Image: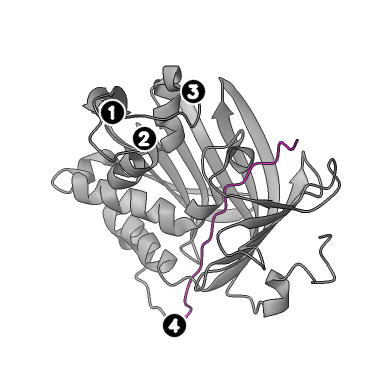
Amino acid sequence: MMKSTFWLVAISVSFSLSFTDPSKMAVDQKVKQVFEVARNIESLKYELIRSERIDGAYVENHFSIKMHRRPYKIYLKELSPNTGVEVLYPHPMDEKKALVNPNGFPWVNLKLDPNGELMRKDQHHTILEGGYDYVVSVMEYLFYKHKDGISDLLQDHGRGKLNGVSCEIISMINPGFGYSNHIVKKGESISSIALKNRLSEYMIYEKNSDLGIFGQIKEGDVIKLPSDYAAKMVLYIDQDRQIPLKLEIYDELGLFEKYEFRNVEINPALGEEEFSHGFTAYGF
């Protein structure tokens, strides 16, 4: 019915914060500073170019996004390849659902479950995992898990340019990345296991293909789990604003997912009407 995919990323910065010159900081402090910036998010507008490995091939989408953090509200419009698809979350009449304008068949607005199969088709993440809150929580979890040797996992690649913006480039390489068997406990689901261990839910399904995408597990099942979210992460940090501009995630096969953020506006004034289906600029 629709092939639009959604992974919604939110980043922000409070200009009242005072930062040390990144070039004089230890690499772990540079990343922690990004964590601090991300925690100060209120609202933003940006474009997201996302590339994810799906069934061995890379699927790329380009989105325009508006986001408000507390309470969480988001408007997304796909620029390509499914031009004109719009998503508004939460649905104005049901806070647990999303309003979707498919801009095509069946030519009516849809009320969809963000965790349902239609909205999760051909994507790694759900709309409910939106924001750098989720990404930062993954990275902070890895910092805590590997706290005794985190400096050995991080590499500072100095400065470079991304779309004309000066960036700090930092990688986190995890030589211990691998897979082990996990015996499913009572009440566990793939989603709960992924959230508890800060793992990619899609990667778990991919490595347990007998389950089928979004398949069910039960107590006593044995599944393969990755040891960490990634074998390698590469982070491009805006040198001036200390916000992420690109994140690359690798597993043992190579690039798993990549997210690039362009034309980022920090804390723009977004009115309530911009998260309403009746906003005149939208096509709902």
**Does residue 181 appear left or right of residue 168 in this picture?**
left
Instruction: Give the CA distance from mark 3 to mark 2.
Output: 22 Å
Q: Alpha-carbon neighbours of circle 3 within 10 Å: few (<14), some, or many (≥20)?
A: few
Residue drawn at x 29%, y 46% is 196
Task: Give the x, y percent position of residue 59.
Answer: 64, 31
Mark 1 or 3: in front is: 3
Q: Work out how far the residue at label 2 is from the one at label 1, CA to CA, in angstroms.
A: 7 Å
Mark drawn on residue 16: 4
Q: Earlier in the sequence, mark 2 or mark 1?
A: 1
The mark that comes first in sequence, 3 or 2, is 3
| Vertical position of residue 97 compared to residue 69: above or below | above
Q: How is the image coloured?
A: one colour
Distance of label 4 from label 3 (alpha carbons): 48 Å
Q: Main secondary structure of the magenta part?
A: loop
Q: Which mark is residue 177?
A: 1
Location of mark 2 (residue):
230
Residue at the outermost top position: 210
Name the amino acid type tagged 3: Gly
Which one is nearer the viewer's eye here, 22 or 54? Answer: 54
* Residue hosting label 3: 212
Q: Is residue 191 above or below residue 14?
A: above
Q: CA distance from mark 1 to mark 4?
A: 38 Å
Instruction: Mark 2 or mark 4: name the one nearer the start of the chain.
Output: 4
Amino acid bearing label 1: Phe
Quadrant occupied by the C terminus = bottom right
Of labels 4 and 3, earlier in sequence is 4
Nearer to us in this view, 137 or 37: 137
Relative vertical location of residue 237 with respect to residue 191 in this rendering, above or below: below
Task: Give, as a three-letter code, the residue at label 2.
Answer: Ala
Q: Residues within 10 Å of mark 4 (few under 14, many from 20)?
A: few
Q: Is residue 173 left or right of residue 234?
A: left
